[in-house]
Image (cartoon, rainbow, N blue to C red):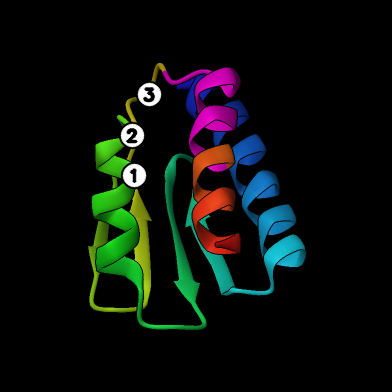
């Protein structure tokens, strides 16, 4: 559970950085490793499919919300990999 708290905080900070960098995320929310971002545009479904093609599993709630529910043992390195891909997709 300690990892969930530590990595969850790191994950949320990185999502907020991505929010500032891309301008395509309107809100970051969550607790521990249960996180979500609300997008400025209705592209959540497309992003989920493109992330899946690159080996990352996440899901969408409607057209504008991405939900992240990673395993409790996720590492910061794995978070970085996902957010690198997500950043590329949001910037495209």
Residue pictured at 67% horizontal, 45% vertical:
14
Instruction: Residue under label 3, please give it.
Output: 72
Return the residue at label 1: 51
Q: Which mark is residue 54?
A: 2
Q: Are marks 2 and 1 in contact (CB under 8 Å)?
A: yes
Q: Secondary structure at mark 2?
A: loop
The image position of residue 54, as x and y in percent, is 33, 34
Q: Is residue 62 left or right of residue 31?
A: left
Boundaries of the magenta span: 74-83
Residue at 25 percent of width and 38 percent of height = 53
**In this view, the mark in front (3 or 1):** 1
Horizontal arrangement in the rendering, residue 79 relative to residue 65 (left or right)? right
Q: CA distance from mark 3 to mark 1?
A: 20 Å
Which of the 4 image quadrants contains residue 67? bottom left
Does 81 lie within the magenta span? yes
* Mark 3 vs 1, N-terminal side: 1
């Amino acid at each position: 559970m300690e990892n969930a708290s530590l990595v969850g905080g790191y994950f949320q900070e990185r999502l907020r950085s991505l929010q500032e960098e891309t301008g395509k995320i309107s809100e970051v929310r969550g607790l521990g490793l249960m996180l979500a971002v609300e997008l400025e545009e209705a592209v959540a479904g497309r992003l989920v499919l493109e992330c899946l093609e690159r080996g990352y599993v996440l899901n969408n709630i409607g057209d504008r919300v991405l939900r992240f529910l990673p395993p409790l043992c996720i590492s910061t390195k794995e978070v970085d990999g996902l957010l690198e891909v997500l950043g590329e997709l949001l910037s495209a």
